[in-house]
Amino acid sequence: MKARIIEVFDTVQGEGIYFGEKQIFVRFFGCNLSCRFCDTPSNRFTEYEPQELFNEINLYKNDFHSISFTGGEPLLQKDFLKEILKLSSAGGYRNYLETNGTLAGELKEVIDYLDIIAMDLKLPSSIGMASHLWGMHRKFLEVASKKEVFIKVVICHSTKEKDLREALKLIKEVNHSAILVLQPNSHEDDAWLRVRIGVFADMAQEENITACVIPQMHKAIGLE
Ligand code: SF4
């Protein structure tokens, strides 16, 4: 069984509540969405067997917090993902999944081997897609809530208040204790957007949802 992997590398986590933790990143090729701000490469990959990938991970000095399986969307290659997660767990590593939060059935098949789930909630007015994904996100969060999960939403100039309200309703109904990360779109991060994010953070507080504003560190310091 082989998977298409864009790259394997080590760096510090630049997003979400594990911001600053050292991780090994395994970036999977391919995605089922097409967000307007996506910058994941879509024209190159290397094929790996699970054991081959695990051997490469083992070449890194074991001083990292966890292995981040990211993408693209790692759950699109769930059979391979399950195998590498099993190897990683058996090797004593912590498994961290970064996902667009839409493939609940696939998540169910691998969740036993995950430690932390960083789930995106795609607001229609942020990602520029006509169809919304609320039903898929709801099912996903129901499954993900068996493990530690936090939720990221990207806030753009185009983000509408009604979308954030819908996201808060979903979190409140499915997993009220999940932390919500408000992430300014790094291409549009200006004074106006910061004011908007302040308004959104207040909305979360009114619903008793823990929210924090965390920018994408790698872009802020010019690492990508
Ligand atoms: S979910 Fe992530 S990888 Fe997929 S299109 Fe959106 S930004 Fe790109």
Image: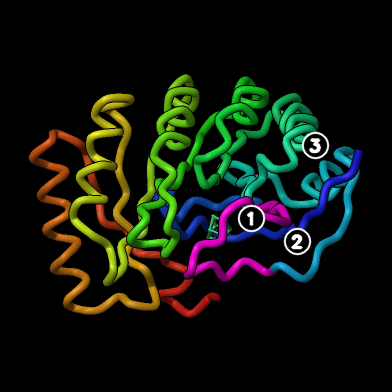
User: Disc 3 designates what residue?
Assistant: 80
Residue 36 image offset from top left, x and y in percent? 48, 69
Instruction: Give the residue displayed 50% in from the left and 62% down from the top.
Output: 35
Q: Is residue 117 left or right of residue 70?
A: left
In the image, residue 195 above or below residue 68: below
Q: Which residue is mark 1?
A: 72
In the rendered image, residue 165, in percent from the top left (x then y), is placed at 20, 45
Q: Residue at position x 64%, y 54% from top?
A: 31
Q: Residues within 10 Å of mark 3 (few under 14, many from 20)?
A: some
Between marks 1 and 3, how big is the CA–CA gap?
15 Å
Using a 10 Å C-alpha cutoff, classify the residue at mark 1 as few (fewer than 14 neighbours), some (14 to 19) or many (20 or more): many
Query: Percent from the top left, x then y, of residue 58?
Result: 80, 45
Residue in the image at 39% along x and 78% along y: 187
Q: Amino acid at mark 1?
A: Gly
Above or below, 120 relative to 30: above
The reply to whether the magenta stretch includes residue 57 is no
For the residues bearing labels 2 and 1, Cβ distance under 8 angstroms? yes
Mark 2 = which residue?
A: 6
Q: Amino acid at mark 2?
A: Ile
Q: Secondary structure at mark 1?
A: loop
Q: Main secondary structure of the magenta part?
A: loop
